[in-house]
C-alpha cells in the first residue's frame, strides 16, 4: 500500500539576526510519519515549502532516498531553495499546475571578525558547490546551464521545470466545467447521482496518481488520510488517520459513502477514529411518533394534577387565614372576660369591708355587758 508524507512550510529551524527562532519541518517529523505507516511499500511525498535550513533539507533528502522504497514527490504551491533538493528525492517527480519552482544560491549572514567572515564565506562557497553538483547529478544539466539560473534567482513554471529535468512527470491538466440548466434555475443542490459521479471521478483520479490508500474529504475540503486503509476499505472506528501530515484530532463532517446526500461526523482522538456519528433524519412535522404522543398525554395529565394541587393549596391557605382571624377574636373575648372577673372580685372585697353590723349583733353585745355588771355587783365588786 502507498503511504503519504507531508512536508509543508519552513524546513528546519531558522534563527534570524535578532535572535528570533522559527521552527519548521525537521527530519524527526518525516521519520515519525514513515514509522506511523509500517505497511506502506511506497510513498507519495507532498512538498509545499519556501525552503529553510540547508543541512536539514539534505538530511531529509538522504533519509527519503535511504528507505529503499519507491518515492514519488508531488510539488504544490511553491518549491523554493532547499525544498527543491527534497523534491528531487523522488524517482517520480511531479509539479502540480501553478506550482512555482524557485532556484537561487544559498544565502546567510554572520557577525564577527574578518577571520569569522572569511570562514563563513568559505562555508557558503562549499554549500554552493554542493548544490550545483547536486542539480547536475539529478537533472543531467551542465554547470554552465545551471549556474546562471541560481545566480539570477529564477522562478520556473511547472512546464519549464519539466523541460529542464527537475520534474519528470507532466502536470495533469484538469479542465474545469461549468454547466447552466435554464430549466432548473432554482435548483441549489446537486442530485445524488451527480454527487456520486463526481466522487467516482475523484477516486479514479487518485488511482491514476498512484494514491491507493483511503482518502476522505470533509465539508471544508480538508483531506483525511486513512493511511492504513486501502482505497476500497470501509472506514470504521479505530482506523488511524492524518490531516495535513499530523495525527487527526477533533471532529470532521464528511459525506456518507453510501448516500452522497447524507453526512456523518468522524470524531478523532490522537490520530485514531473514536466515533462515527450518523446524522439523525428529521421526521416530517405532521407525523408524530407514538412515543411523543404518549409523552404529550402524560405531560397534560401532570399539568392537570399540578393545577389541582395549586387550587387545594390555595383553599388551605384561606382556611388557615380564617382560623387565625377567628382565634384572634376569641383571645380578645377571653381577655375581656378575665378583666371583668377581676373587677368583680375587687368590688366584692370592698363591699365586705364596708358592710354595717346588724342589730342582732349589737343587742347581743349590749346584753353581755349588762350580765357582766350584775356579776360584779353580786360579788361585792
Image (tube, grey):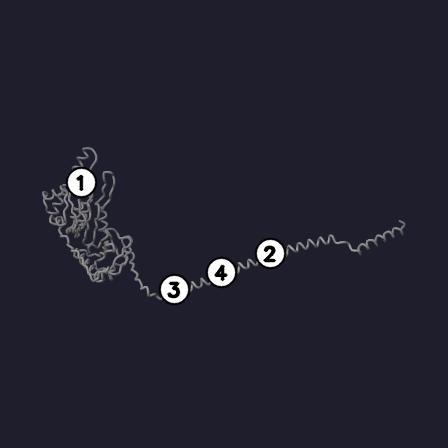
First in residue order: circle 3 vs circle 2: 3
Q: Secondary structure at mark 4?
A: helix
Q: Secondary structure at mark 1?
A: loop
First in residue order: circle 1 vs circle 4: 1
10 Å crowding of disc 1: few (<14), some (14-19), many (20+): few
* Picture coordinates of residue 378, whole percent (x, y): 89, 52
Label placed on residue 296: 3
Q: Residue furthest bottom?
A: 290
* Picture coordinates of residue 305, whole percent (x, y): 44, 63
* Picture coordinates of residue 350, whole percent (x, y): 71, 53
First in residue order: circle 4 vs circle 2: 4
Label placed on residue 332: 2
First in residue order: circle 2 vs circle 1: 1
First in residue order: circle 1 vs circle 3: 1
Label placed on residue 314: 4
C-alpha span from label 2 to label 1: 109 Å
Are the two marked residues, 4 and 2, in contact with CB atoms closer than 8 angstroms?
Answer: no
Label placed on residue 107: 1
The residue that appears at 41% across and 64% down in the rendered structure is 300
Q: Along the horizontal axis of the image, is 209 left or right of 283? A: left
C-alpha span from label 1 to label 4: 90 Å
C-alpha span from label 4 to label 2: 28 Å
Q: Nearer the viewer, mark 1 or mark 4?
A: 4
Amino acid at each position: 500500500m502507498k503511504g503519504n508524507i507531508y512536508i509543508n512550510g519552513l524546513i528546519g529551524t531558522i534563527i534570524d539576526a535578532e535572535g528570533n527562532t522559527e521552527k519548521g519541518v525537521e527530519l524527526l517529523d518525516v521519520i515519525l510519519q514513515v514509522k506511523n505507516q509500517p505497511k506502506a511499500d511506497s510513498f507519495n511525498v507532498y512538498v509545499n515549502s519556501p525552503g529553510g535550513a540547508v543541512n536539514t533539507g539534505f538530511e531529509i533528502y538522504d533519509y527519503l532516498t535511504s528507505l529503499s522504497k519507491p518515492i514519488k514527490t508531488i510539488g504544490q504551491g511553491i518549491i523554493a531553495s532547499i525544498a527543491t533538493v527534497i523534491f528531487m528525492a523522488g524517482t517520480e517527480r511531479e509539479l502540480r499546475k501553478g506550482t512555482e519552482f524557485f532556484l537561487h544560491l544559498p544565502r546567510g549572514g554572520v557577525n564577527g571578525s574578518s577571520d569569522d567572515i572569511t570562514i563563513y564565506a568559505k562555508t557558503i562557497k562549499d554549500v554552493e558547490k554542493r548544490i550545483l553538483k547536486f542539480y547536475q547529478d539529478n537533472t543531467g544539466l551542465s554547470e554552465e546551464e545551471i549556474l546562471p539560473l541560481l545566480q539570477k534567482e529564477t522562478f520556473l513554471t511547472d512546464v519549464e521545470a519539466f523541460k529542464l529535468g527537475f520534474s519528470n512527470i507532466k502536470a495533469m491538466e484538469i479542465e474545469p466545467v461549468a454547466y447552466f440548466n435554464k430549466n432548473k434555475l432554482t435548483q441549489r443542490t446537486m442530485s445524488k447521482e451527480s454527487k456520486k459521479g463526481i466522487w467516482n471521478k475523484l477516486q479514479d483520479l487518485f488511482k491514476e496518481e498512484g494514491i491507493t490508500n483511503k482518502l476522505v474529504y470533509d465539508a471544508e475540503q480538508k483531506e483525511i488520510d486513512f493511511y492504513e486503509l486501502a482505497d476500497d476499505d470501509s472506514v470504521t472506528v479505530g482506523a488511524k488517520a492524518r490531516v495535513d501530515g499530523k495525527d487527526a484530532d477533533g471532529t470532521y463532517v464528511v459525506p456518507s459513502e453510501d448516500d452522497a446526500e447524507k453526512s456523518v461526523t468522524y470524531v478523532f482522538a490522537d490520530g485514531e477514529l473514536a466515533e462515527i456519528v450518523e446524522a439523525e433524519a428529521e421526521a416530517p412535522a405532521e407525523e408524530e411518533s407514538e412515543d411523543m404522543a404518549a409523552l404529550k398525554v402524560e405531560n397534560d395529565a401532570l399539568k392537570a394534577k399540578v393545577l389541582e394541587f395549586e387550587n387545594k393549596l390555595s383553599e388551605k391557605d384561606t382556611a388557615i387565614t380564617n382560623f387565625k382571624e377567628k382565634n384572634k377574636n376569641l383571645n380578645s373575648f377571653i381577655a375581656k372576660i378575665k378583666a371583668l372577673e377581676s373587677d368583680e372580685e375587687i368590688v366584692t372585697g370592698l363591699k365586705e369591708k364596708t358592710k354595717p353590723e346588724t342589730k342582732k349583733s349589737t343587742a347581743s353585745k349590749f346584753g353581755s355587758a349588762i350580765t357582766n355588771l350584775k356579776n360584779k355587783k353580786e360579788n361585792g365588786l
